[in-house]
Image (cartoon, rainbow, N blue to C red):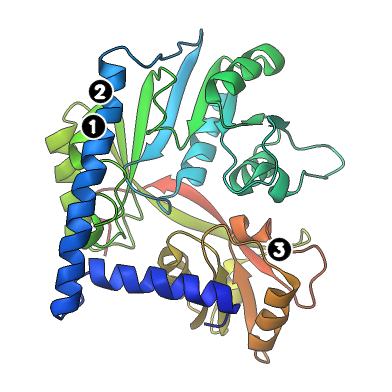
Amino acid sequence: MTTSPTDNRKLDRIAGLFDIIDGAPGARAALARLLLRVLAGVHWLVLEAWLATYRLGLARVTTLPIEVISVGNLSLGGTGKTLAVRRLARELTAAGRRPAILSRGHGRQSGEERIVCYRADGEMPHSGEVGDEPSVLAASLPDIPVVVGRNRRSTGRRAIAECGADVLILDDGFQYRRLRKDREIVLLDALQPPARDCLLPRGTFREPWAHLRRAHEVWITHAQLAPPERVAFLAQQAARYAPPARVRFTEHQPRHLRYLHGETAPLEMLRGRRLLALSGLGNPRQFELMLESLGGPIVPCRYPDHHRYTDTDIQEIARRLEPGMLLVTTAKDAVRLPDALPFPVWVVEVEMVDVAEGDGG
């Protein structure tokens, strides 16, 4: 995998930390895990002190006059929240509702609030202005407004007043406590290694397992790609900590390929082709496993999560493309690529679908 020197150092640090978390042998790694566990204990104390301000009424929670549904997770990114939000928005629309999506717009360059909608002329605000997820969601949900801003109480009011919304979908909202939520949907990634099921920095959890009790629904994602025993464990955790919650088993199902400039092609085009798997994701392995399942031998080309591709990156990617190789990427990465590219790019269009428990492995 070849990236810029800065990105290489960042990826090396992340990989080194995950090696330690996942159980790298040796006394130094064991000592590092002990230190990480101590720091995770500090994280827990700070978290509980912060939550106490809400339990004691010291922090104000805003109630909006319409239903608010949160889609979030216990852990850091990579669970499939964007696909889950898109699926939920479509389900609500099919039921006759008028949803709007509230997103913080992670990684955007502007701090101002924005209402993002797909325009008839096909032009979209650059993802650098509104964030990766709002750009992807607005393009795939042309009739549903995405309201971007750090203060979801304010953007929620705008969605009601300016967009006529009768239900709000709060993207990445499990840790957002300043807005009262009527329904909490929590995603658990079945591809996450079990060793990472600990609080930061000992693992990747932002909140401990016990906080799953707030969930009304638990969606176990990547249930077909993951080992069945891992899926069963997550279902047991949901039953233990959130017994009333509805549990759904989901998978990221590829539908077709889309050329970066609009043309579509069947997935069969990947069969037997050598693929350069370009991604800047929190969990690139799930994308790579999906491509492997489609039949093409892959060469990973990883960048940090939410990476914005520069001209230098494009030159390096071009050098990595071998004769006959296809460059395949994700919808999130596609919005971060420059408009003018010296090579063709294919995007795998994916939907989140339900699967039966036990279909994994």
Q: In which quadrant is the C terminus drawn?
A: bottom left
Q: Amino acid at mark 1?
A: Glu
Residue linked to disc 3: 337
**Label ID, residue 244:** none
Question: Where is 269 relative to 261, above or below?
Answer: below
Residue 173 in view of the camera: yes
Q: Amino acid at mark 3?
A: Leu
What residue do we see at 47% from left, 56% from top?
253
Q: Amino acid at mark 2?
A: Ala
**Label ID, residue 52:** 2
Secondary element type, mark 2: helix
Q: CA distance from mark 3 to mark 2?
A: 43 Å
Residue linked to disc 1: 48
Q: CA distance from mark 1 to mark 3?
A: 40 Å
Q: Is residue 184 left or right of residue 66?
A: left
Q: Are marks 1 and 2 in contact (CB under 8 Å)?
A: yes
Question: Where is 38 relative to 312, above or below?
Answer: above
- Where in the figure is residue 37, as x and y percent of width and height? 18, 56
